[in-house]
Amino acid sequence: MGNTLSLFRLALKEFIDNLRVYQALQAKALASPGFPRPNSTLPYWTVPPSPIAHHISELPDYADVVIIGSGITGTSVARALLDRCQKEGRRVKVVMLEAREACSGATGRNGGHMTPPLYHDYLSLKQEFGEAMAHKIIRFRLAHIDEMRRIAEKEGILAESQARHVETADVYFKQEMFDKAKAKMEQWAKEMSLEAATHRVYEGREAIETFNLASDTVGCIACTAGAMHPYRLVTGVLERLLERHSESFSLCTQTPCTSISAPSSSSPHYVLSTPRGTISTSHIIHATNGWASTLLEPMRGKIIPFRGTMSAQRPGRTLTPKALSGQRSFVFYSAKLGYDYLTQLPGPPTGSYELMLGGGFAQDGEQGLEALANADDTVYDRTVGAHLSGVLPRYFGEDNWGAESGPGENGESLWSGVLGISADMRPWVGRVPTSVSGRPEPSRATSDVTEEEKGDVLRPLAAPGEWIAAGYSGEGMVHAWMCGKALAAMVLNREVDDGLAGWFPDAMRINEKRWKKASPEGLLEMLSNDE
């Protein structure tokens, strides 16, 4: 799911530019997303399922930290908490609650690409936050490319996770769009020359021949990016956390958190209700992205679900070996078709050269309205699916593409997934203010020591509370892992030790002032002014 923030803005802008859609957005954005539904569409990534897909640990009465959500954010938080405490010789009990199977949300349904927005929205970031913060945000996004490969290598899952560097190309079919993109890229490159070192512009015929594209391609902007098998990486990390922290970590799939009760005189901790019973905790981590406002009602209208569509397809018979190397990804800009994004998988043994294509926004006949504030991933839009199944020969050119691989093989798999769109297009990370959660925090006195270690070892945690990392606006692959890592440092009360001020953008922190300002109306205004 998702592509770049600026691209997503363009797609949204296409279908909110009339009063009917504007009014519908206002109403739908304030509704509850509900809970993840059973019998969701089946993503290519999850076949075959991970050995821990249905792992159900015993639900304890109490945990130091309860993480809601088992995707890339929740896994990042769990890994940082558990490994840090183990290294320091301290034990923290962490329970992860998942409504369905492990990694069954957006992480297991996206496009597998790590293509950070760079020149695309640098100037708007600079205008809003200043040069220093704009640089920090860009570097934060870029850092995910090497960080995810490092994690995969350290966990011994580099091959199965397919974590790799790729050459990515923004492909333009309209000269005006290409000229604007080049101007943005040139300005960004002047101010962040080191980060722009791998960027290169390909004009006309050179772009067509280099990337095997259709003859009406006017140009490309290419650079180094990343890609991976998101489901294998996350479930691989979770499997290893269960092994090395068997006494401290519990993964409870098929265990949705259905409600949260505030601390009271009779129960000094938060009490989370599930169909399997209740669990008490001092720290709640909301890592549910598009579903976050179900349990955090005041976040409705701040994080808005959006249903996207993905596909896995076989390549045409005459695509060149270079086009099938698994070392490329694309974003296709077309004034008529909006945008689509493509990641190529490697060949055997880890892949079969599948083409992972997503997008098709505003192709549903309702200007994308059906996808907006829609958290139902049990179906996908058939019109969008038809678009994705048939558009690749247009992008690569009929001659380059050739005949389909075989009867029915061109649309191998189609599924949907739920994105979390932030009302101000920034992730929400940090301690949730009580004015936002609507619930008081447990007192520090109830949370200083573990149940087993009273009078012995102090917990290495911050004051109790609710925490969040969510609202990636379709860009989770270049925000979520390190947002989770930053959040873990906050929960551990290690912000200074971990040098967060040097690498984590404060513009992503949640606070009451930002919460009050962000709104669906503000999102619409931002999009309508976006160039």
Image (cartoon, rainbow, N blue to C red):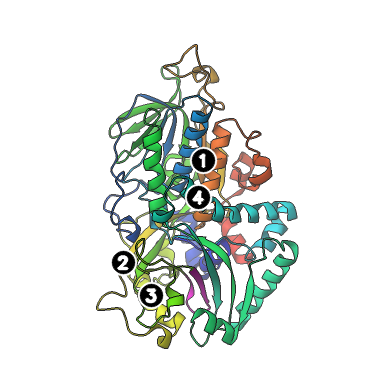
Amino acid beneath label 4: Ile
Q: Disc 3, disc 4: CB below 8 Å?
A: no
Q: Is residue 526 left or right of residue 52?
A: right
Q: CA distance from mark 1 to mark 2?
A: 33 Å
Specify start and end residues of the magenta stretch as a single range.
328-341
Q: Earlier in the sequence, mark 2 or mark 4?
A: 4
Q: Earlier in the sequence, mark 1 or mark 2?
A: 2
Question: Where 500 sits versus 167, above or below?
Answer: above
Identify the residue shown where x is 67% and y is 65%: 196
Q: Secondary structure at mark 1?
A: strand
460 horizontally vs 234: left or right = right
Three-letter code, disc 3 = His
- CA distance for labels 3 and 1: 35 Å
The stretch drawn in magenta includes residue 4: no
Badge nearest the viewer, 3 or 2: 2
Main SS, magenta residues: strand
Comes first in the chain, label 3 or label 2 = 3
Task: Establish if 98 lies above or below 394.
Answer: above
When the figure is inspected, residue 530 is found, relative to residue 140, above or below; the finding is: below
* Residue with the mark numbered 4: 303
